[in-house]
Image: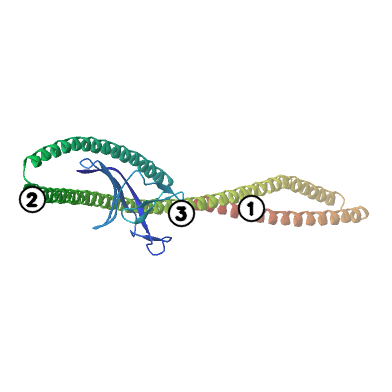
Amino acid sequence: MEQPIFTTRAHVFQIDPSTKKNWVPASKQAVTVSYFYDSTRNSYRIISVDGSKVIINSTITPNMNFTKTSQKFGQWADSRANTVFGLGFASEQQLSKFAEKFQEVKEAAKLAREKSQEKMETSSDQSQESGHETQSGNQESSFNGTDDEKISHVPDDTALKSENDRLKSVAEQSKKLEMELQALKDSNAHLTDTLNEANSKAESWKSKVTQSQDENNQLRHKISELEDQCKEVNQERERNAQLSLRIQELEADLQEKEQELEDLRKQAETIPQLVTKCESVTAKLQAAETANRGLSEKMTLLQSEIDDSQQNQKNMKSELKRFMDVLDGKIDELHEVRQSISKLGVDN
């Protein structure tokens, strides 16, 4: 009964029988390559099956050598199959493990051959001893018989013995072939189960990879959405910053307008004093007119003073009017500024 003791995967090649130089692919893809141990025959074989086709069936002997020709490729020659097998591995580590196993199996095959030779030598010694005894017995019988019996008896025994040996050899070969056929069937069934299991695992891995890809796509979509949201938040922050700057500018303008208004208010406080002065001057003028009506000479002087005073009064009134107009304009501007500030506060 053969059992697998080591299994790996590799691309299988055979040497071109015509050129003995070029490699010919024996498999379209990486296939399972296994070491098998036959406990009944005490032998080791390398077997590889691609589908239903056996592409490697190499019995390992002590004379075989496995050679690494590159970091991922190795080969060995099989004189019985009259070919050279080559294996291409996916990594240098797999090649090293296969080569170590080849050397280990080679040493085991060597020990098995030595033990077999010792058994054969022991059995041959025993058969020689029994053969000597048989020959001595035959000689005694021949001595006791006639010449005709000698001639007729010896050839019949030889023919029967050779025929018996031939039949035994054929039977043993038939049994060996049957055992090899059964081992190949068992190996093929085991390799088929292994291949089916590998295919199911591959399908499972494919489904997992597909699921992972879908999850990655969903995560990428979510990341893109978050990036868009971050962009919108940044834009809103920029708008708020711009509005804050605009509010600060308007507040500064408002402070300037309030300062101007305060200055105008201070100037407006001097207007009653000017009015009071004007009324006082008018009263004095009236008193002077009443008191000095009779004095014509002084009247002229007073008239000139009155004219000057009236002119000053006109100038003061025109200045006061202009000041009131400016004050009204400033008040209107301050009112518009306050309305724009209140509007910006509502919008924000």
Dot 1 alpha-carbon crowd within 10 angstroms: few under 14, some 14 to 19, many 20 or more? some
Marks 2/1: CA distance?
Answer: 160 Å
Bin the neighbour count of mark 3 within 10 Å (Cα to Cα): few under 14, some 14-19, many 20 and up: few
Relative to 226, 337 lies left or right:
right
* Mark 2: amino acid: Ser
Q: Which mark is residue 228?
A: 3
Q: Which residue is mark 2?
A: 152
Residue appearing at x 82%, y 47% in the figure: 284
Q: Rounded to the nearest whole Å, what is the CA distance between mark 1 and mark 3?
A: 48 Å
Could you tell which of marks 3 and 2 lies nearer the N-terminus? 2
Q: Position of residue 123 (x, y in %)?
A: 21, 36
Q: Which residue is mark 1?
A: 331
Residue 130 appears in the picture as rendered:
yes
The quarter of the rendered structure image containing the N terminus is top left
In the displayed structure, would residue 203 be above or below residue 6? below
Mark 3 or 2, which is nearer the eye? 2
Q: Earlier in the sequence, mark 2 or mark 1?
A: 2
